[in-house]
Amino acid sequence: MAERVTQEPDRQEREAQAATSAVPSAGSDGQPVALQTEAHGQKPAAGTREAIYDLDDVGVTYGSVPAVREVTFPIYQHEITALIGPSGCGKSTLIRCLNRMNDLIPAASVTGKVSYHGQNLYDDEIDPVQVRKHIGMVFQKPNPFPKTIYDNIAFGPRVLGMDGNMDEIVESALRRGALWDEVKDRLKTNAFGMSGGQQQRLCIARALATSPDVILMDEPCSALDPISTGRIEDLMLELKENYSIVIVTHNMQQAARVSDRTAFFIVDLKGEESHRIGHLVELSPTEKIFTNPDDQRTEDYVTGKFG
Amino acid sequence: MSAVPEAGLSRKVVERASSGQRTKDLMFRLALLFSVSVGFVVLAALVLDVMIDGASRVSLDFITSFPSRISPESTGVKSALIGTIYLMVLCAVFIVPVGVATAVYLEEYANRDSRLSRLIEVNIQNLAAVPSVVYGILGLAFIVRGPLGLGPVLLAGALTLGLLVLPVVIIVSREAIRAVPSSIREGSLALGATQWQTIWKQVLPGALPGIATGVILALSRAIGETAPLLVIGAATFARFNPEGITDRFTAMPLAIFEFISDADTEFRAAGAAAIIVLLALLVVMNAGAIFLRNRYERKW
């Protein structure tokens, strides 16, 4: 497995992780996907991680076209969960359910339960704006606001009416985003003047400024060169100490490098209308997915037989 | 060995275009050039003619004197110029909030597939093409008389002209709002901003240069409108400035109309001079719009 972790503490942390998380999943070897939630039931008892999300039979439909169906799995705190799979398998659609960004597409409808700390995010009384205050998101293409670096970071805290010294909030967010040293002398310049990799780290820092619990990343490195990608991966490993991260990626090596747990999705051609519907094949500790997956399709995918 | 026939073949493939094709190409280009020159020559002739007739009459006195019925030498456009400026300001105050709010609703809130919003959309497109005299009749019936009953005053003129150019403002503002990429909206909403905060703090600032350009271009259309003001009963000759929004008024195109239609042909030079003043005002406004567009337009 291609390790690209530069910091020793991270490596130790990850190895410790792999050791503990391997225990329950070993018991579920060869079991169908749905049973993974039962493994989750055993998790707290095993004294490892607490689930922040619990997806229960989640499906998304655009108009009458289903995009992804019957997804059931938990997402644990202070872990990086990677969603991988071929194009059109519904990974991005699914991650956008986790902070209700799918609401922006009028035709999209979500079935099943997306529980966040035990609360179904799709309950009627839930306000999507409140959901997004707790759950940050980083997009495929860096999308800084056409404002100064400072104002990009300060935008979130300002609209949320956060108390405190804005200069300190901005500095702390930029430090957590590993960007402070590069930009501290040009906070008042336009963010469009930054490189692509810096812009993406700015977007991460911007998400951190509002102190979310979870950070969702939808292919955050797909528009970046390998060096910028490496820096963002290092940053993710640092951030998981304090945040939970869900990342959609097309890059299997990236999933292998950074994630603790990997969910593999696949797309079925269903019916005569050839609707493409994505669904979950398996969710396991990353090491298992890449070395000894339960499902033959996972193995075929990670070894490059298709996709 | 085999290279020789290949070379021969390629020489055959890349033939020169036949002379007939080249002639056609040339004819087409000439036809295009002719079409371009029609517009340009007409404009140039118009400006030149007006300049010859009126350039000698344009002076500071001309724009600071009230019109006169008896002396073509000392007549001026003071009241018309002031009236036009008031009209433009009032008109902007009316069309900017209403036009931008409509555009925001249609772009950000309305369900595009609903019957109602499609009806509104088609209506706005059609309203932009309604002849201005019809707006004048509307203004006369509803603003000057009828429900509002303001009389032929500045406010009534500004509202009538505002209605006339509102569709243009809405269409241009919608385009400017649509040009703000959805990634900006997503970025803002993902941070927990409400839809209103996203519109007010991200979308509108991003669309502002486009909106401002559109408003100026709409106003420069309104500034030259004569028919609606005549229909609502604005004065064509006034030796007083409007003092408030409920005063009677005159405007530049009306002053031109008055000068040109005077039985005394001596007034025609004054008419040409007034046209020059109006054209200068238009050039300044359009230059402002171009400046705004080039200076602030964002490449996303």
Image: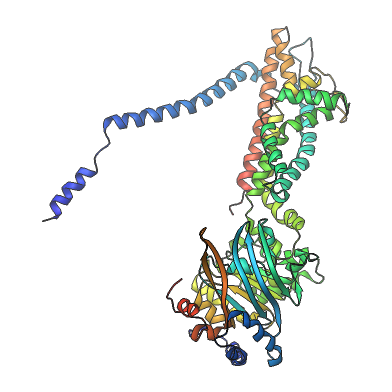
| Side (left or right) of A219 relative to A104 | left
Model colouring: rainbow
Q: For the view shown, which residue lies furthest in the top direction?
A: B263
Above or below for B73 versus A135: above
Q: For the view shown, which residue lies furthest in the front direction?
A: A272
Q: Residue at x 49, y 26 (%)?
A: B37
Q: Nearer the viewer, residue B10 or B114?
A: B114
Residue A259, can we see it? no
On the image, the x and y values in percent for residue B219 come to 71, 34
Quadrant in which the N terminus of chain B appears: bottom left
- Classify residue B124 by image quadrant: top right
| Side (left or right) of A64 relative to A126 | left
On the image, the x and y values in percent for residue B131 come to 69, 25
On the image, the x and y values in percent for residue A175 come to 67, 76
Q: Nearer the viewer, residue B208 or A13?
A: A13
- Classify residue A185 by image quadrant: bottom right
Q: Nearer the viewer, residue B47 or B42?
A: B42
Q: Nearer the viewer, residue A280 or A169?
A: A280
- Classify residue B253 by image quadrant: top right
Quadrant in which the C terminus of chain B appears: bottom right
Residue A257, can we see it? yes
Above or below for B4 versus A15: above
Q: Residue at x 58, y 69 (%)?
A: A91
Above or below for B100 versus B245: below
On the image, the x and y values in percent for residue B42 come to 54, 22
Number of marks in picture: 0
Q: Residue at x 83, y 23 (%)?
A: B141
